[in-house]
Image: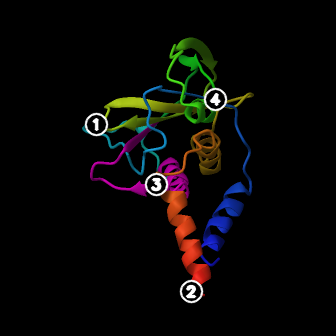
Amino acid sequence: MKKLYPILMLVLTSCLGYKELPVEYDYSYKGNFKKYRSFDLMRQVGKSDSTMTNDAIEKSITARMKFLGYKKTTSKPHLIIAYKMFYDSLIFNGYIQPEIEQWVHTGKKEDLNYDKKRYNLKTGTLLIQFYDRRQNRSVWQGYATMHYGGIDFSNNRHLRNAVISILDKYRFWADGFIEQQQASATEEIDNP
């Protein structure tokens, strides 16, 4: 039970002051969403791009992934996570797909069409992408913007809300994490 208190406190404190933003996401039918265990954040090489570097975003992504049981590692992570802040409006191509949990649960591999959908995103959009390092491809991306004005990228609370809103759509525990938690809880009950 002692191990559940930090997780419960993380959930409660992360919800305080949280305002869910409108989010869209799409994914690759080649993603192995039940098999990922580790992640790292994409690092820039060469000249720094300020739209892809932000401590508040990186801390929020890391906290959320660790909450889901993923291990952060620089050595051959399963997922590499990138993000970008778009200050201007943009037209973005996404896809019309079944909800990801439904698709993964049914395991249907037929009907794998990617039906494009164009999004006219407002000023101040945050995009987060997950790359499968072994497949060398993007497997999931989520994007958030405000209905009435953009995300204020200079406001850390706005950035945390955007990250939480986006990653709330990625609902996969790390491979083996639930079983590990159950084994720990059973051991704690057996050996108080």
Q: Which residue is mark 2?
A: 191
- Category of crowding for the residue at label 3, using alpha-carbon neighbours closer than 10 angstroms: few (below 14), some (14–19), many (at least 20): many
Q: Which residue is mark 1?
A: 47
- Category of crowding for the residue at label 4, using alpha-carbon neighbours closer than 10 angstroms: few (below 14), some (14–19), many (at least 20): few
Report the amino acid beneath label 1: Lys
Of the numbered discs 2 and 3, the one sitting upstream in the chain is: 3
Of the numbered discs 2 and 4, the one sitting upstream in the chain is: 4
Per the model, the C-alpha gap separating discs 3 and 4 is: 22 Å
Residue sitting farthest toward the bottom: 192
Q: Looking at the image, which residue is at 47% across and 26% down?
A: 28
Magenta stretch bounds? 56-83
Per the model, the C-alpha gap separating discs 2 and 3 is: 27 Å
Mark drawn on residue 99? 4
Q: Looking at the image, which residue is at 36% across and 29% down?
A: 137
Of the residues tagged 3 and 1, which is closer to the observer? 3
Residue sitting farthest toward the left: 46
Q: Looking at the image, which residue is at 62% across and 66% down?
A: 7
Residue 69 pos. (x, y %): 50, 57
Between 26 and 81, the residue placed more toward the observer is 26
Between 190 and 22, the residue placed more toward the observer is 190
Of the residues tagged 2 and 3, which is closer to the observer? 2
